[in-house]
Amino acid sequence: MSYPKIHRWTYSVPATLALMAPFDILASLAMDIYLPVVPVMPEALGTSPSVIQLTLSLYMLVLGAGQIVFGPISDVVGRRPVLIGGTALFAVSSVLLAAASSAPLFVVLRLLQAIGASAALVATFATVRDVYAGRPESSTIYGLLGSILSFVPALGPIAGALIADHFGWRAIFLIIGILSIAALFSAGMRWHETRPATTARIALRPILTSFPFWVYTSGFSAAMGAFFVFFSTAPRILIDKAGFSGMGFSLVFATVALVMIVTARFASGFVMRWGIAGSLARGMAMLLAGAVLLAFGELFLQPSFLSFVVPMWIIAIGIVLSTAVTANGALDALGETAGTAVALYSCVQSIIVGFAGTVFVLLLGGDSAWPLVGYVCVTALTTLSGLWSLQEPA
């Protein structure tokens, strides 16, 4: 896909990052910032823990699935209207979430919040592609925005615990709403339209019939889903069973992010040594190793930092090794359809993670490590089977 040169975007890379990063951060924060107060929310909203779990799953599903909708819309109406409209919806729903008094209203507002976040993310990444396609700066920007999506959800609960301890859980959503309003005003004044005058025809068939696309998308789903199931079950295991406080839980939870950050520092060297397929295979192996330790802890140990969090450190290493290569592996042979493939890649991953991850939590119980063990074993083994098939001679 070729893009005409964009003349209206004259910001430096640091200025571009300062403008774009808040939308990525807010969409990521909203994913799980209220994890430390999940145990008290069912009583506050007069509902069950499974409904609160639904609000986590729903956000993940819609955040990914919405991108396949808003991507084409942004090609028609432009990036700026999608960004402004999505951020406005995100801001309004966040403020209303702070005032929600019933579970059905909370779920609906959470859905709207995810729709707004999805639109903002699509517009952000599409703008990067418009402005920096074929330029070396794109790797810096994509790298930072991708890191935010990975690391912020692991650090968000610390902010949520601090806010909840001082102002109550409703203040979490109010503060997100206020911050998104500030980002909206900044974008309204500085975000220029970058949509190319002509865009390529959307072609789904080459993507849907690409076996490598599905294998590497499966690997991405295995990695991100492991983290999703972890943060879906962690509050009930570490707070309710292991006895951690909200702040203690958040600090322990953040150690997973620290492992990911350290591993990411060396990921490029690992990829150069092992290649794309080799890195993904080792990432899946790390996920399975962590799952084995989780199963051991569930069978023979009491819920604790050692039995639940330490195995997650191993899984976190596998997550980084996998996500460092899955996009390149999925999109490598798709040429001019890469733009559509990116949207579909994210959409499929989110649907698998949100649906399958939720099914494992509901079927195996959200207060044990078994959902994480089950999800990792099924998805990692599926990916390894696909990689083996790719290596087989035709």
Image (cartoon, grey):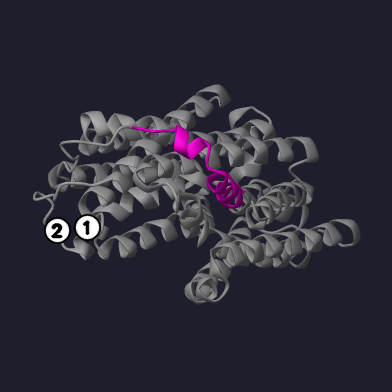
Residue at 66% in and 47% down: 229
Q: Residue at point 49% right, 25% down?
A: 108
Question: Mark 1 packing: few (<14 Cα in 10 Å), some, or many (20+)?
Answer: some
The residue where tag 2 is placed is 11
User: Are dots 1 and 2 in contact, CB under 8 Å?
Assistant: yes
Q: Quadrant of residue 90?
A: top left
**Which of 218 and 151 lies nearest the eye of the viewer?**
218
Q: What residue type is labelled 1?
A: Thr
Residue 80 in picture, x, y percent from top left: 21, 38
Q: Can residue 98 be seen in this view?
A: no
Quadrant in the picture for residue 353: top right
- Answer above or below: position of 287 versus 354: below
The alpha-carbon separation of the residues under discs 1 and 2 comes to 6 Å
Q: Is residue 148 left or right of residue 56?
A: left
Picture coordinates of residue 394 (x, y %)?
64, 51
The residue furthest front is 394
User: Is residue 192 rendered to the left or right of residue 332?
Assistant: left
Q: Which mark is residue 16?
A: 1
Give the residues in magenta. 202-221
